Amino acid sequence: MTSTSNIDANDAVAVQSEGSGQIRLVNLTKTFGNTQAVANVSLTIPHGSYCCLIGPSGCGKTTILRMIAGHETPTSGDILIGGTSVIGQPPVNRGTAMMFQSYALFPHLTILDNVAFYLKMRGVKKDERRRQAHEMLERVQLDHLKERMPAQLSGGQQQRVALARALITNPKVLLLDEPLSALDEFLRLQMRGELKSLQKELGITFVHVTHTQPEAIALADMVVVMDNGTIEQAGTALEIFNKPETPYVARFMGAQNVLTGKVDAMLAGSAHLVSHRGEKFEIPLTKRSTEVGDTVSISIRRDVISVKKASDTDPAAAVNTVFGVVDSTEYQGNFVKVSLKIDGVDTFVANISDAEYFSETVGPGDRVMASWKTAGVHVLSKVDTDSAGSPYAI
Amino acid sequence: MALSYNPRPWTFYVLATLFGLFILFLYGPMISVLILSFQGPNGSLNFPLREPSLMWFDEVFSPRRVGDVPGAFGRSFPLAMIVMVLTILISVTAGFGFRHKFSGSSAIFYTAIASLIIPGLVLSIGILVTARFLGISADWFSTALGAHLSWTLPFGLLIMFAVLGRLDPSYEEAAFDLGASRWQTLKEVVVPIVFPGIIAVALFGFTLSYDEFPRSWLTAGTKNTLPLEIWTMTTNVTSPSLYALGAITTGISFLVIGLALGSIILIQRKRAG
């Protein structure tokens, strides 16, 4: 009993060999009344990885986390941890521990007794459980506050206590429900770094629910982008950010610009698209077979676009260019965010380096041309059906 | 020159006066009774206070003169204690029951609360009639107990609704996550967190029963509870011992309230540090 309740580096290795923290979701579905929170989701999270579930509120990410934890029962489908189905098992038998969004520290217990709670439930003697809880608090550098009550601690300290309380169960999987959302910006960045290094050190699987893109990109080995109860894309942060599969992922994760057109001509290694407004885009040919007449959506990162004032002499049919009117400009320190309206409808955003911006400033109302190089174009595997733009494009 | 940045509006003075009068009405009579309970042997039922003494307190405890006060107290106090314990048991468990929505839960809730609006005297008659019909004799420990519970349970339930409504379900989930059984979760987490609320339920249970007149009127049987005894005395005792009795019973109520509030404050101070 004591060996399973005391975490240090050696134990973390032992856990790895004892039982794998691999999580497999098989056709997982959860319905609440008439609404389907999670719809037939299948996913494998490798052992020892840092996985971030990201999506707007109501996308089902927290429901998945709670089903893995055992706080919600799936309507259908299976959850396997380390290869065995855990449906119907209590959290302790699953090898999971959860850190709640509100931290849920017991207000009537001292910090020490909060951390020792798991051991108390297992009947560990008072002196022994306090000793182990003390060691755990030393790990999160809070042993000097062990006699305090939770209400006397700052948000960041409370979070460390919640972490210590979860880790004392020696889990194979740590589940974190929006763990950084209650912290201020400075603490958030600090705790983000600490979570990442802790995960590396323990070598266990972390599943972290968030709605903040930079958090997912910075932390995760595996990012799972969700919308409407389904997985839009799962992959490394690099893949999600640079090679989004769907217009939704392109917009939600990278706040990228999505354009759609019909293939007009095939060239060697590339193809030409014509949009419904007559703009011409050159796209690199991917593995996907493309034929003349196909409708194709592409995404262009905000930071590969240059913006110039449009003059009458500009060729109307320039390739990889859209014309629009500046809607707003926002100085962001190291770059300037320039939002255009194309035909007064579609939003197109470019992030321009401040040096480039201040060499030729543009302001609201100016007619400008935004252009990019073919190498900066990414072809999406799904055609954009949301041509009016996404509510998540910030 | 006195220059105020924030002169108080005239409404402040009107409302402050109103509040002062309210406090006077609230506590004035009680303080008068308290003062007059120390009336001397030649004093009357009215002011002024002459030759202050403790003689009327002594009088209270001699059954010959003013009726059976110690006997009435000997019924009222255990009755209030029983009502308190039952109110805690029933409203706390019912409160937890209502946390999970079940079909007909709101109908049951409103049925339970509705007994608050039934006039106590009417209820008293109803209980007596029903008890007679069922062949149960009216006694403080049977019919009066039931009548008092019809008054304290809705209050207890309402308090538990307020308390449990603020209880974050993630505390229980966290306990479950840390390997606590349902019973351990209740014992180690939920009850300690809602304990101040349970004390409030106890307080209401005790004081509502201890002071209850209308619902005791016909249900207490042949032997009076304390409020009934005091009422009887007002009709045939015309000495300041009435005031002494009032002072003692009020003192007991305050003692109970003080103990309860004190323990709530103690718990919260321990928690907040």
Image (tube, rainbow, N blue to C red):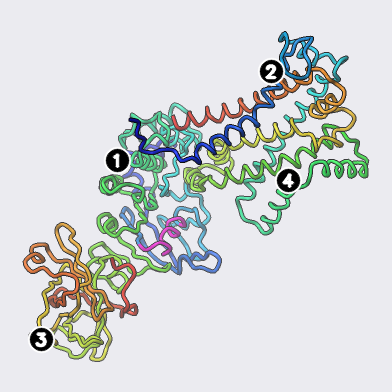
Mark 1: which amino acid? Ala
Q: CA distance from mark 2 to mark 4?
A: 35 Å
Q: Which residues are magenta?
A: A55-67
- How far apart, in angstroms, are the residues tagged by discs 2 and 3? 102 Å
Q: Position of residue B89 (x, y in %)?
A: 68, 38
Does the magenta run of residues contain A183?
no
Is residue A62 a member of the stretch shown in magenta? yes
Residue at which label 2 appears: B35
Check contact, mark 2 vs mark 4: CB within 8 A: no
Q: Position of residue A172 (x, y in %)?
A: 38, 49
Neighbours of disc 3 within 10 Å: few (<14), some (14-19), many (20+): few
Q: Nearer the viewer, mark 4 or mark 1?
A: 4
Q: Residue furthest front?
A: B1
Residue kind at label 2, given as amino acid type? Ile
Q: Residue at x 26, y 48 (%)?
A: A189
Callouts 2 and 3 on one subunit:
no
Residues tagged by mark 4 and mark 3 found on one chain of the structure: no
Q: Is residue A260 left or right of residue A43?
A: left
Q: CA distance from mark 4 to mark 3?
A: 83 Å
Q: Secondary structure at mark 4?
A: helix
Q: Is residue A97 visible?
A: no
Dot 3 falls on a residue whose secondary structure is loop
Given the image, what chain letter belongs to the residue carrying mark 2?
Answer: B
Q: Quadrant of residue B221?
A: top right
Instruction: Residue under label 3, please give it.
Output: A315
Which tag, 3 or 1, sits closer to the chain's start? 1
Provide the chain ID for the residue under circle 4: B
**Residue beneath label 4, please?**
B116
Single out the mark in the foreground, 2 or 1. 2
Marks 4/1: CA–CA distance: 62 Å
Q: Which residue is mark 1?
A: A9
